[in-house]
Image (cartoon, rainbow, N blue to C red):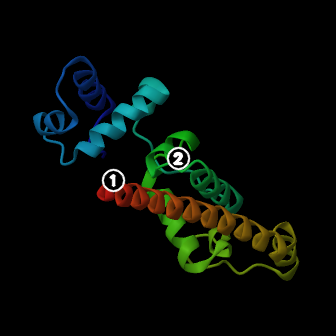
Amino acid sequence: MTKYTKLFKFKVVQDYLTTSLGLELIARKYRIKSHTTVNKWVRQYQYFGTEGLEVRRPEKVYDGSFKVNVLKWMKTNQASLTETALNFDISAPSTIWQWQRTFESSGVEALYRGKGQPKLMPRNKQNKKIKQQSELEQLREENELLKIENEYLKKLKALVRSQQDDEHKSSKN
């Protein structure tokens, strides 16, 4: 059983949208542990309407190329986990966070592996799977992700340097 029904979520969202209470007060009023949960519901409602508040089961199994595309989009657009989840209709932003951690710790090839123990396949099926996503393609995708990450870090470094220069100039005057 789910913790919150669609009707309850809708009531909370409507209360937030029609009153001047903030996220934290709404969360306290309805005894919701975190105001970020309320914020997530509001964003889902604004993005998808009442369907965004549906109780969803994680039935989807995402393939490796989809995961890579999601991570590329997030880095390219400098989007948060929540924004990315909304954009790709992924029920839990933590799913993307897990993909990001997997990529950072084990590389792009880990995103193509399924959960649990690998099933034993006959040799001919293994060869087909290998042909579908060659190592070269995986390396290219990983390289592209790393380039995007590198560009992001360069921009961040330039921004920090610019702010430090501004502070230095204002302290001299």
122 to the left or right of 40: right
Q: Quadrant of residue 17?
A: top left
- Residue contact between numbered discs 1 and 2, judged by CB atoms under 8 Å: no
Residue at coordinates 63% horizontally, 76% vertically from top-left? 107
Which sits earlier in the primary sequence, circle 1 or circle 2?
Answer: 2
Query: Extreme top residue here?
Result: 18
172 to the left or right of 27: right
Residue at coordinates 48% horizontally, 65% vertically from top-left? 98
Q: Quadrant of residue 132?
A: bottom right
Whether residue 36 is situated above or below residue 131 in the rendered picture: above
Residue at coordinates 24% horizontally, 26% vertically from top-left? 16
Task: Give the CA separation, mark 1 to mark 2.
Answer: 38 Å
28 to the left or right of 164: left
Three-letter amino acid code at disc 1? Ser
Whether residue 42 is situated above or below residue 165 in the rendered picture: above
SS of the residue at dot 1?
A: helix
Residue at coordinates 51% horizontally, 60% vertically from top-left? 156
| Residue position marked by numbered label 2 in the rendering | 84
SS of the residue at dot 2?
A: helix
Q: Position of residue 64 (x, y in %)?
A: 68, 63
| Residue position marked by numbered label 1 in the rendering | 170
Q: Dot 2 surroundings within 10 Å: few (below 14), some, or many (20 or more)?
A: many
Give the camera-side residue of 161 and 34: 161
Whether residue 14 is situated above or below residue 130 in the rendered picture: above
21 to the left or right of 161: left
User: Mark 1, mark 2: which one is toward the viewer?
Assistant: 1
Whether residue 20 is situated above or below residue 138 in the rendered picture: above
Q: Quadrant of residue 147?
A: bottom right
Q: Position of residue 125 (x, y in %)?
A: 84, 74
Give the camera-side residue of 113 and 160: 160
